Image (spheres, grey):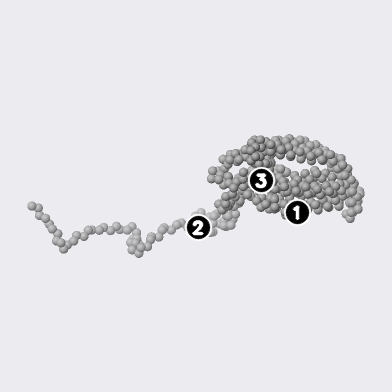
């Protein structure tokens, strides 16, 4: 039998434990003190003015903080200015199409409620659109024909009254305290006649240019008519189709801003028509009572000029004052001036705040700048569409900036 060696019970066998020697001699001390090891120091950037390895200071450390911020803002502003300049150049090249479409939008905003009312009375959509557009354009044509007819019918009398007015003005200048002699007035008259005679070539060129302008005007009228018909008949579908060109994340916000923009444009057009009608009636009635010739054509001109805020009212009022001064004298011109100023004060303080409301209110400085910019870019048509464009842009910007805090509003029909 094999012998079995037994270990006495009073002796216990202890296992042998091996210790791993730390690589860092101080690691054991840090572990014993429960202190984490410090991370390695990061390379620090050279302080301001300290030269780099090449012996020159770093450019970033030399440029002050304010200049860096100004440079960051400046190049972004330059990019925005370049985009705006390109956009203005493109609009100036195709201004006929842009103005025609803008005029179609304004006319559509004016006529759309009529189409809606006809549809509520179970009139087919196509018939309601055609009838409304036909009546609207016929009415505009009749107004234009009436103005031209009145001017041509009173042209002879107006020429005689103009000559008499010039003679009265000459006599008033001779008796005025400005010490103007008759020889000086004759010299100015002869010089004016010579300048008109020497500019016959320019007048011929202007006549040829007028033919081109007339052709562009007819083209713009046709584009406006067709655009108005399609917008009246299929406006919502055109809007949905336009949304496809917007980025997908922004479509919901733009879709919510569209009805608000259309409501603003509709309110602006309707309010401007009402205000222009009141101005034309008040001023036209006043100059008719004062027996100023061409009272009805002047009233129509005042109505049309009211669509150019501030500038149009001043220009049409000045025209009425000049006609009254030339034909009726200084006293009648002063009365017409008082009437024009009174009606403009009524418009600015009562009519526009009450009829247009706060939704389409634009600061007078914004009105003047927008009218000036529109006139520089696209002439009279640009001045007409500038203010409603600014009003719509103001509404859209307010909706996009505050869409998270505003309560949802019902979209117009």
Q: Quadrant of the C terminus?
A: top right
Q: Is residue 55 left or right of residue 364?
A: left
Residue 393 is situated, as x and y percent measured from the top left of the image, at 63, 48
Q: Residues within 10 Å of mark 2 (few under 14, many from 20)?
A: few
Residue 105 is situated, as x and y percent measured from the top left of the image, at 66, 42
Q: Residue at x 33, y 57 (%)?
A: 23
Q: Residue furthest front?
A: 121
Q: Residue at x 79, y 51 (%)?
A: 340
At mark 1, the secondary structure is helix
At mark 2, the secondary structure is loop
Q: Residues within 10 Å of mark 1 (few under 14, many from 20)?
A: few
Q: Which mark is residue 46?
A: 2
Q: Is residue 103 left or right of residue 63?
A: right
Q: Residue furthest left?
A: 1
**Residue 92 seen in this snapshot:** no
Q: Residue at x 84, y 41 (%)?
A: 154
**Residue 401 seen in this snapshot:** yes
Distance (Cα) linking label 2 and label 3? 63 Å
Tell me which label, 2 or 3, sits earlier in the chain: 2
Distance (Cα) linking label 1 and label 2? 67 Å
Distance (Cα) linking label 3 and label 1? 24 Å
Choose mark 1 or mark 2, whichever is in front: 1
Q: Are marks 3 and 1 in contact (CB under 8 Å)?
A: no
Choose mark 2 or mark 3, whichever is in front: 3
**Residue that label 3 marks:** 266
**Residue that label 1 marks:** 345
Q: Residue furthest bottom?
A: 33
Tell me which label, 1 or 2, sits earlier in the chain: 2
Q: Are marks 2 and 3 in contact (CB under 8 Å)?
A: no
Tell me which label, 3 or 1, sits earlier in the chain: 3
């Amino acid at each position: 039998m094999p012998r079995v060696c037994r270990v006495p019970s009073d002796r216990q066998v202890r296992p042998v434990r091996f210790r791993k020697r730390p690589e860092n001699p101080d690691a054991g001390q840090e572990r014993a003190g429960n202190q984490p090891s410090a991370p390695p120091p990061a390379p620090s950037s050279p302080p301001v003015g300290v030269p780099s390895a090449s012996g020159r200071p770093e450019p970033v450390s030399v440029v002050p903080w304010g200049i860096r911020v100004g440079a960051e803002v400046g190049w972004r502003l330059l990019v925005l200015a370049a985009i705006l300049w390109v956009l203005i150049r493109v609009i100036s090249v195709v201004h006929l199409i842009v103005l025609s479409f803008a005029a179609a939008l304004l006319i559509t905003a004016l006529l759309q409620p009529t189409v809606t009312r006809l549809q509520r009375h179970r009139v087919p959509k196509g018939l309601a659109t055609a009838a409304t557009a036909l009546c609207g354009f016929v009415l505009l044509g009749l107004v234009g024909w009436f103005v031209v007819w009145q001017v041509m019918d009173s042209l002879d009398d107006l020429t005689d009254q103009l000559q008499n007015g010039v003679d009265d003005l000459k006599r008033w200048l001779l008796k005025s305290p400005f010490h103007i002699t008759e020889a000086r007035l004759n010299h100015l008259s002869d010089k004016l006649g010579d300048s008109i005679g020497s500019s016959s070539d320019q007048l011929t060129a202007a006549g040829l240019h007028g033919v081109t302008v007339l052709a562009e005007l007819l083209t713009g009228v046709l584009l406006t008519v067709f655009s108005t018909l399609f917008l009246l008949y299929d406006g919502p579908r055109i809007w949905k189709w336009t949304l496809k060109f917007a980025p997908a994340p922004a479509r919901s916000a733009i879709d919510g801003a569209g009805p608000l923009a259309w409501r603003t444009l509709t309110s602006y057009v309707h309010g401007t028509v009402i205000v222009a009608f009141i101005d034309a009636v008040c001023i036209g009635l006043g100059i008719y009572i004062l027996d100023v010739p061409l009272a009805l054509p002047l009233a129509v001109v005042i109505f049309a000029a009211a669509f150019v805020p501030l500038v149009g009212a001043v220009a049409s009022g000045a025209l009425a004052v000049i006609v009254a001064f030339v034909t009726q004298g200084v006293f009648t011109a002063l009365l017409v001036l008082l009437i024009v100023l009174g009606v403009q004060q009524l418009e600015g303080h009562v009519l526009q705040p009450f009829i247009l409301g706060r939704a389409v209110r634009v600061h007078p400085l914004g009105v003047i700048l927008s009218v000036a910019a529109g006139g520089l870019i696209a002439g009279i048509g640009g001045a007409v569409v500038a203010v409603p464009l600014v009003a719509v842009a103001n509404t859209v910007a307010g909706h996009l900036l505050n869409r998270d805090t505003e309560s949802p509003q019902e979209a117009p029909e």
